[in-house]
Image (spheres, rainbow, N blue to C red):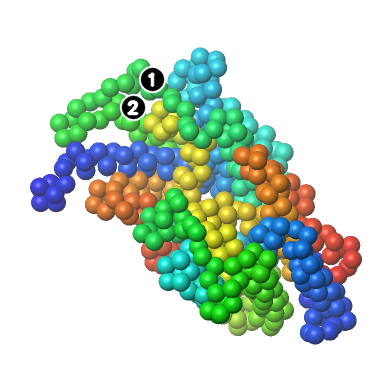
Amino acid sequence: MTDQTLERTGTATGERSMGMPRHHLVIFAGLLMFFLVAPFFLYPVFLMKVLCFALFACAFNLLLGYGGLLSFGHAAYFGGAAYVSAHAAKAWGVTPELSVLLGTGSAALLGLVIGLLAIRRQGIYFAMVTLAFAQMVFFFALQAPFTGGEDGIQAVPRNMLFGIFDIAQDRVFYFFVLAIVFGGLLILYRIIHSPFGQVLKAIRENEPRSISLGYQVNRYKLAVFVMSAALAGTAGATKALVFQLASLTDVHWTMSGEVVLMALIGGMHTVFGPIVGAAVIVTMQNYFAGFGAWVTVLQGTIFVIAVLLFREGVLGVIGRWLKKPM
Amino acid sequence: MFELLGIAPQALFGQLLLGLINGSFYAMLSLGLAVIFGLLNIINFAHGAQYMAGAFVAWMLLTYLGIPYWGALVLSPLLVGAAGIVIERLMIARLYHLDHLYGLLLTFGLALIIQGLFRNSYGISGLPYTIPTEFQGGQNLGFMFLPNYRAWVVVASVIVCFGTWFMIEKTRLGAYLRAATENPTMVGAFGINVPRLITLTYGFGVALAAFAGVLAAPIYSVNPNMGADLIIVVFAVVVIGGMGSILGAILTGFGLGLIEGLTKVFYPEGSAVVIFVIMAIVLMVKPAGLFGRTA
């Protein structure tokens, strides 16, 4: 997406501490403070949902905002990992951290297989190919013996952390989720601001030129695809433990659409934008849950408005005002 | 031969017919996508929703105004196509200078709106639409029973597909269209109103989807979700065929419908995913698609 790439690396602003521009450090610290205090005022399960979708949206945006690749099938990794993590916790009694790791690993593997095929096409074909493969995963989830068909995997237990600590209570489990999501966000931040991330941006801006500079473009694309899928899987696996449920909703194409919307309204070319987008969409779903299909209409309307008038997203606009990339 | 395979001929031909019907819809929808993509360079994600809208408009015309099937077959594509033209003028036209992916996102949003609105008004249980009296009953062909309406669907779709191909490849209007696909600036310099050509093309593609929707109404129940899952399969069909050629889109549509039908006979569990598997194989062997030009 070469439209108005305002975003520049933090190096231009000069002020840096702990390897990142100072205002990014402030944002990270502010977010952490907020989420440490928030469960005492807000419903923890709602907050955990926001956290999981924030990680999902950021992982997705690594691919879209920095790799320039629009995947319309990220529900496959999110939902696939949710099923693996739920099955591992329920059928094998695996500890939560292992469930999440298994989910992440399986999403990475799925991302590798689909990515190998999908990167053979560009642009809108890439979007259609990823969508079609995600639909294949959906049919697999519908028919496979261990996924429970229409019911999904219900009543997933929250086992002992490391086999010792009891974290089943929502308020305690919240901090487990917070640790995972912040770990994931820091990893994503590191990837974006690494030399690897710089090459990705170069490929996004001008692929033929990157090839002529000697970069193995397809390897970079595949690598970022797998990373994005893996972290989307982390989010899905965690979400399965939060709601103690893995269902067809997680692998449906509407989920792929939702994560695109989160990245779009938050700001595709920003690091923190998808977090804002996820918070907005999850809150909206929460408060409008009683209105049935009107939520779909509202989401569609936001999509249309965002594409027509608001392509930079919330944090894209704020970043432009403050002259600091978000 | 049938005894050797252990398959009753009725089952085999019955599934082949179903495959041919599905193939008709794949062909008409992927044709519409290809026509729109050729000139507008966007993928019309709302195509499935517009197909559904076509079926619904036919149902409304019958229920509220008493206009029968034949009237709907003409009116519904016109109405839905006109709505498409309005959408193109008001929204899509603002995105041509941007990355093509924005067109995909916009039409995805539109699809959500259209589906949501119909779901709010009519629920998801589906509404019946009776087969027109001319086509009730069927023919006994000896080896299978052929319902008249299904035969008509296949015939109608072949006519529409061939008509579209003829218009684009053999007429003057089609020549303008193909020229505008290659080089819009040059065609504009020759005094042809390219923006209007683009608008009409989008309207035509949408009308094609609505026409398919009217054909589908008596076969499948009229349902707000009828287009959503279909369109994803059609995307896979488009990836397999490649959007470079009109004839390619038609052939791929019918061919894949038949293959899907055969899969239902020999390996029913795989019938939902066979097209996606074929897509994976085509991506490995010929990434540009069977009829595609290498980008």
Which residue matches tag 2?
Answer: B149
- Residue located 77% across and 52% down the image: A310
> Regarding mark 2 in the picture, which secondary structure is present there?
helix
**Does the image show residue A58?**
no
- Residue located 55% across and 30% down the image: B122
Residue B262, x across and y down, in percent: 27, 48
Which residue matches tag 1?
Answer: B132
**Does the image show residue B8?**
yes
Using the image as rendered, state which of residue A3 and residue B186 is in the foreground: A3
Q: Are marks 2 and 1 on the same chain?
A: yes
Q: Chain of mark 2?
A: B
Using the image as rendered, state which of residue B114 and residue B31 is in the foreground: B114
Say if mark 2 contacts mark 1, CB within 8 Å.
yes
Q: Chain of mark 1?
A: B
Q: Residues within 10 Å of mark 1 (few under 14, many from 20)?
A: few
Using the image as rendered, state which of residue A326 and residue B261 is in the foreground: A326
Q: CA distance from mark 2 to mark 1?
A: 8 Å
Report the side of A12 relative to B129 (left or right): right
Tell me the amino acid under the disc marked 1: Pro
Residue B152, x across and y down, in percent: 34, 28
